[in-house]
Image (spheres, rainbow, N blue to C red):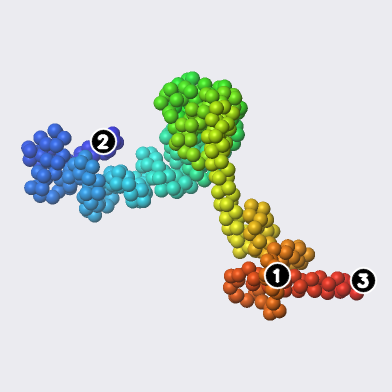
Amino acid sequence: MIFKLLLFSLLFLSTGYLFSQHSKEVEDALRNNQYGQVLTLLENELPSREGLLLKAHCLEKTYNYPAAMNVYKQLLGDYPDDANLIITMAECASQIGDKQQSLRYWIMADSLSPGNHYIQTKKSMAFYQNDNWKEAIEEAKTVFKVDSVPLLLRMVGDAYLHSSKGDSAIWYYYKTLEKNPADRLAVSKLGKIYLGAKFYDAAIDLTQSYLENINPSEPIISQLNGIAHFSAGNYAEAAQRLNETVALGDSSYTTCYYLGVSLYGLKSYYEAIPWLERAYMKNNSDVYLLYHYGTALSKLYDRKKGIEILSEGVAKIEEMNAMLFDFDRSFADVYKRLINYPKAIEYLQSAYRRKPDAHSLLYDIARCYELMSDNNNAITYYNRFLKTAPQSWVREDYLINVNDSVEINTAETLYQIATQRAKVLKEELVFQAEGEKNLN
């Protein structure tokens, strides 16, 4: 905001703008921050560069950024090489929420004023806001040759994190904290990386240092410290820290859940139940919550309710298993299309373990083995599939070419194909064995 005010002043000074160029009413309204009144008075004046700049400024002050952008575009047509004007347009586009347009203007400004530290910083941030992680990192490194901006250091850490380059993200978060130890977001993100990597002691030390030396009343870091203690098995320390987090005003699901399971870990079931219940009231979809809450209830006075909660957990697990079955089928289909039959078989077998009544999976596995020219396993799975045929199924003598574009939409068709393929493959094995015998 300070930069925009300075920029607005520079725009006016660079064109010799003076208040006296406008009526006294405009001057008075502007000095009194009556921007709507200024806009009304400007309608009676002849258009000029200074007047349009003032109009756009007042439109921005009244939060009418789209209208201000239209005025800036009108000016840009006459002054396409005005870097200050283009910077203002980039800021205005950002206010509108048009990230791509803002980036385009920052690129234009950089081409007109190369080496400008401020423009390079904003350009890097614009790349980041458009999810262009690589470009954001490269542009930021150009800035770092001149100055290590803490905000930009953290942003590069975020960009590396989005790019799944955790080691580089850690390094930049470290550099951020060297410059600004009070950067709460850098501490939080670095701490979460440590938790994800199971570096619990590192997460504890990081967050503990922040709470002791920077701000003991920061609930996000306090919560993270409690979770790290819980993950490390320090249930007493976790419960104490998370109680302090609640005292700081954090009653989120995460805090209630981890406080509850920390007390559960201490076998303080009576104290754990209220916190697990609060978490349950906020979100009852977590099977781990349902297990701990239901078990705690069952250990104390309300066994009936404990059974109900545990039953909810079982239902959730069954629902998850059903979803995992669908994922396994989808993975198998993808790997079959990639002609990676061993991997496809792996997922088909996993799906069959989850749902043993999905007999057609046995046919699919047999077909994959056949495509791999593994006739022994193909025959084994064709026969396993045929054993699931109902007693009412009657084998027919007609042949089906599995390579034809025939729509296989009934189990009877699959059984018919499996019968003929098992027979053909057995004959091929016999023929192969006799050929090897004759060679010997």
Say which element carries label 2.
helix
- Report the residue marked by disc 2: 6
Say which element carries label 1.
helix
- Classify 432 as above or below 32: below
Q: Nearer the viewer, mark 1 or mark 2?
A: 1
- Report the residue marked by disc 1: 418
Label 1 packing within 10 angstroms: few (<14), some (14-19), many (20+) = many
Q: Earlier in the sequence, mark 1 or mark 3?
A: 1
Q: Position of residue 183 (x, y in %)?
A: 44, 29
Q: Quadrant of residue 396?
A: bottom right
Say which element carries label 3.
loop
Q: Is residue 378 left or right of residue 35?
A: right
Q: Earlier in the sequence, mark 1 or mark 2?
A: 2
- Classify 319 as above or below 291: below
View extreme (front): residue: 304
Identify residue type, mark 3: Asn
Asked whether 92 or 143 is in front, the reply is 92
View extreme (right): residue: 440
